Image (spheres, rainbow, N blue to C red):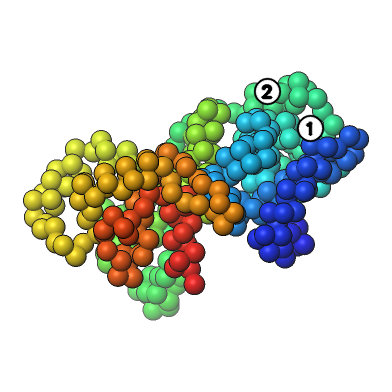
Amino acid sequence: MNKILKLKDKELVEKFSILVKEEKEATAQVEEKEAIASVVSHLAEIDRRKLYALEGYSSLFNYVTQKYHYSEGAAYRRIQAARLSLRFPEIMELLKEGKINLMNLSLVAPHLNQNNKEKIFSAIFHKSTREVESIISSYVGKRKEVKDKIRVLPPLAPKIAQNFTFSAESNERREPEIRKEPEGSLAIPLVLSDHDMQVKEQRRVKIEFEASEVLAQKIQRAREILRHRYPQGKLEDILNEALELLLEKKDPERKIQRTLEKKSSDVKSETRYIPQTIQREVYQRDEGQCSYVSPEGKHCAEKNFLELDHIHPWSLGGDSTPENLRLLCRTHNQWRAEKTFSH
């Protein structure tokens, strides 16, 4: 993996193309296993660097299916393995040795965590797909039902400087008594001091529930869509983003607030506001698709998740004229912004 990290962008893409060809032309089982492992490891680095965007594709999935002509299923399994390898690096060696394959890995992926990975991996070594499905069924069946719960966690590193008591008789200072609360319970003071309020702001909660694999797939897809904004793919960020969108659309209180803000604000000429007439003109000119073209001449042409981009950035003095605007898909708009402002 260290060798892959040292490759320049162009070298990495060229190497990946060679590996894809080797995988598809592999005849012996050993050759195929090693080729798949190499493809997956290089794909993980391409994903991390977002080189698919540079190449003119709106997603890693489109990059793999359109440029390299993998079937949708084959592309999904390789992408899933590549991203799993960032959490479980041992996957690469297991694929190379042929102890697990991409199909079986995709089956156990929703159930993997750092605590059970060794047990699950060893259980599926050299197993058929049907055997792995049976293993998963028995594994899930043995689990106790987890009730939905939200539990407040202890505050993050609270600084209690004066929380000591003195004995009225001996005048000795004593450490505060710590009472262990029953698991899952929390004592919250009815009256909060300034210090208590600071502690409250630091509090975190643990949310726990069981869900279907369909929901897990939706979350994974949301992670992929929001990877540019949340590279770590933390569930907290993904769910917060989803709930913000829901509340923004459905919460009546927010609708009232937006109405009040709209009435109290004046749209000035020096804002980022782009008139509808200009938006329509740019949309028609760019034919309703992403206008990004790669250095090799590949036109993205994505028609979903389109955004207006200032060619000369608005924050650097660019205006909102049709000549300075273009349609970009969300991937290329974010990628371009990262390239522009990360230096």
Residue at (60% x, 43% y) in the render:
63
Foreground residue among 118 and 95: 95
24 left or right of 342 in image: right
Q: Residues within 10 Å of mark 1 (few under 14, many from 20)?
A: many
The image quarter in which residue 139 lies:
top right
SS for callout 1: helix
Residue 182 visible somewhere in the drawing: no
Query: Is the residue marked by circle 2 packed among few (<14), some (14-19), or many (20+) residues within 10 Å?
Result: few
* Residue at the outermost bottom position: 171
At 88% from the left edge and 40% from the top edge, which residue is drawn?
31
Q: Which mark is residue 137?
A: 2
Amino acid type indicated by mark 2: Ser
In the image, is residue 191 above or below residue 246?
A: below
Nearer to the camera, 158 or 70 = 70
Task: Please tell me in which quadrant of the rendered image residue 306 appears.
Answer: top left
Name which residue type carries label 1.
Answer: Ile
Which quadrant is home to the N terminus?
bottom right
Provide residue 285's location: percent of width, then percent of height: 34, 46
Query: In this view of the protein, which residue sits in the foreground, 304 or 92?
Result: 304
Instruction: Kindly identify which residue carries mark 1.
Output: 124
Report how far apart the C-alphas of labels 2 and 1 lie in the structure. Answer: 13 Å
Q: Describe residue 103's horizontal placement relative to residue 247 as left or right.
A: right
